Amino acid sequence: NTYALRAGIYGADNTTLNMNGGTLNIGMWGLDIGRGRSDQHGSTDGTMNMTDGVINTQYFAVPMAWSNNTPGYDGSNGYIQGTVYQSSGVINIVDSFQIAAEDSLGSVAMSGDAVVNAGGTLDMNHGVEFYATASLVIDDAAAVNIRGLGDNYGGLDPDMDLLMEEIKLQGYISEGWITSNTGTPSLSYDDVTDTFTIVAPEPATMIILGLGGMLIRRKR
């Protein structure tokens, strides 16, 4: 158990966190993969490889970065970079899941049976500046679940909250920030659990669609 865990912190660039099993509980300061800000040369890149286990964290930032109107100084690629490879295991987040804040590069690649459960919201290119780039790739049986929608927009109108969240998440997919190697990811909502889920299309579905396209072309 720890209050905070940071892969990549001042003076320790290109730090890697490997999670191969067990349970990791992180408190109020959360998990940062890469951390810093654009006017501090001590800011650093970070990488996480997760092949199994469970991470429970207050928030999850890839990377945790913020701008001071001076882009492009930190990390090995010119600006702060966070990279996550998750092939299995579960990440439970109490609050937000953030990919690429301000002047930063954030990429998350999920495959196998990897799962991320976000109790708050998914924020990509949050507070975006000119240099922020977010990427979330979901393959195989991996899934991202986003809950707690009533608090995301003040909770004054639950129906409007749901609509705003759906528009935002679908926008991430439409903009190409959330992708899959097997096609366009799908977004669904379960009103019983109050949860949005983003998954990759099933390969069988893609084959059927491909066959349908062949039939249409032959008919023509």
Image (tube, rainbow, N blue to C red):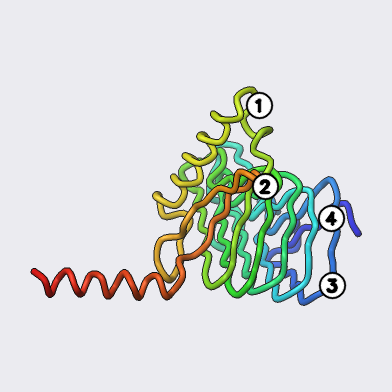
Q: Quadrant of the N terminus?
A: bottom right
Disc 3 residue type (three-letter): Gly
Residue position marked by numbered label 3 in the rendering: 22
Mark 1 is surrounded, within 10 Å at the Cα level, by few (under 14), some (14 to 19) or many (20 or more) other residues, namely few
Mark pair 4, 2: CA separation: 25 Å
Assign a secondary structure to mark 3.
strand
Of the residues under marks 2 and 1, which one precedes in the sequence? 1
Residue position marked by numbered label 4 in the rendering: 26
- Label count reads 4
Residue 84 in percent (x, y) is at: 63, 65
* Label pair 4/2, CB-CB below 8 angstroms: no
Determine which of the numbered discs, if any, sits on residue 193 in the image: 2
Judged by depth in the image, the label closer to the viewer, 4 or 1, is 1
Disc 2 residue type (three-letter): Thr
Q: Residue at x 66, y 33 (%)?
A: 150
Of the residues under marks 4 and 2, which one precedes in the sequence? 4
Assign a secondary structure to mark 2.
loop
Of the residues under marks 3 and 1, which one precedes in the sequence? 3
Find the residue positioned furthest to the right: 1
Left or right: residue 135 versus residue 63 is left
Judged by depth in the image, the label closer to the viewer, 4 or 3, is 3
* Label pair 2/1, CB-CB below 8 angstroms: no
Assign a secondary structure to mark 4.
strand
Of the residues under marks 3 and 2, which one precedes in the sequence? 3
Judged by depth in the image, the label closer to the viewer, 2 or 1, is 2
Mark pair 3, 2: CA separation: 27 Å
Mark pair 4, 1: CA separation: 26 Å
Find the residue positioned furthest to the top: 156
Determine which of the numbered discs, if any, sits on residue 154 in the image: 1
Q: Nearer the viewer, residue 179 or 85?
A: 179
Residue 12 in percent (x, y) is at: 75, 63
